[in-house]
Image (cartoon, coloured by chain):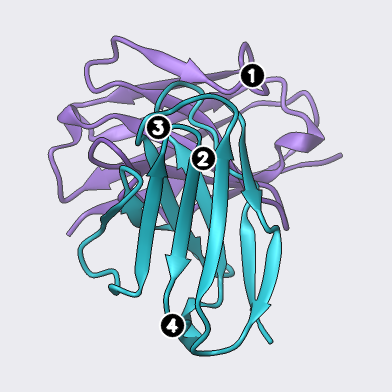
Amino acid sequence: EVQLVESGGGLVQPGGSLRLSCAASGFTFSIYWMHWVRQAPGKGLEWVSHIESDVSRTDYADSVKGRFTISRDNAKNTVYLQMNSLRAEDTAVYYCATGKPGGLDYWGQGTLVTVSS
Amino acid sequence: IQLTQSPSSLSASVGDSVTITCRASQGISSYLAWYQQKPGKAPKLLIRSASTLESGVPSRFSGSGSGTDFTLTISSLQPEDFATYYCQQLNSFPRTFGQGTKVEIK
């Protein structure tokens, strides 16, 4: 059974940093692209970032470029999202997701990040 | 690439047929997915590649389109279908989502 389990969310002050983790199991993690998607309270889905299987390429939404960094450890079956210079508008549930080409088949349960003083 | 869904919300009754449209700001071939999301839950993939129904998804869901115009149709709405639906383009990065369509009970 495929499982994606996010952790690392919490309350952080504006300007602060947080690192999210997503532990994967039940599939061959090393060959799948991994994504982060977020959802602000009461709002729609926003794609945040992706990393290719061999770490050769990463991409970011314009809203987080230069502040967030995605990485992965294929030996630990884990993908990370380092979030720096956090703003109130980064408050959201952050999901990690993956899947075959053409769609995101598997999602975690999400972890809540709240940026507030 | 921007995706515009319409309508933003709709009210319908059990048994109704509903259609949601998703328009891309530039051509994306058939690189479009549809998701269903219920409150407090992660999204669920319904359709990939514009028209390929995912395993386990009821056949009352169907998708069509290519290029810039796409549709999701639910042929006979069931109580469990009341949810918010999102399209996502997978043609290029960033992998944008539509703003969502909330399907409510009339």
Q: Residue at x 42, y 42 (%)?
A: A96
Q: Chain of mark 4?
A: B
Instruction: Tell me, yes or no, whether the two marked residues, 3 and 2, touch with CB atoms within 8 Å.
Output: no
Question: Separation of disc 1 and disc 2 at Cα?
Answer: 13 Å
Mark 1 closeness class: few <14, some 14–19, many ≥20 residues within 10 Å = few
User: Same chain, marks 1 and 4?
Assistant: no
Instruction: Tell me, yes or no, whether the two marked residues, 4 and 2, touch with CB atoms within 8 Å.
Output: no
Question: Separation of disc 1 and disc 4 at Cα?
Answer: 39 Å
- Which chain has been coloured purple in this picture? A
Residue marked by disc 1: A62
Given this view, does label 3 or label 4 mark the residue nearer the observer? Answer: 4
Kind of residue sitting beneath label 3: Leu
Secondary structure beneath disc 3? loop
Q: Horizontal and vertical percent for residue B35?
A: 44, 56
A14 with respect to B56 (left or right): right
Residue marked by disc 3: B90
Residue marked by disc 2: A37
User: Same chain, marks 1 and 2?
Assistant: yes
> Furthest-right residue in view?
A117
**Mark drawn on residue B76:** 4
Q: Chain of mark 1?
A: A
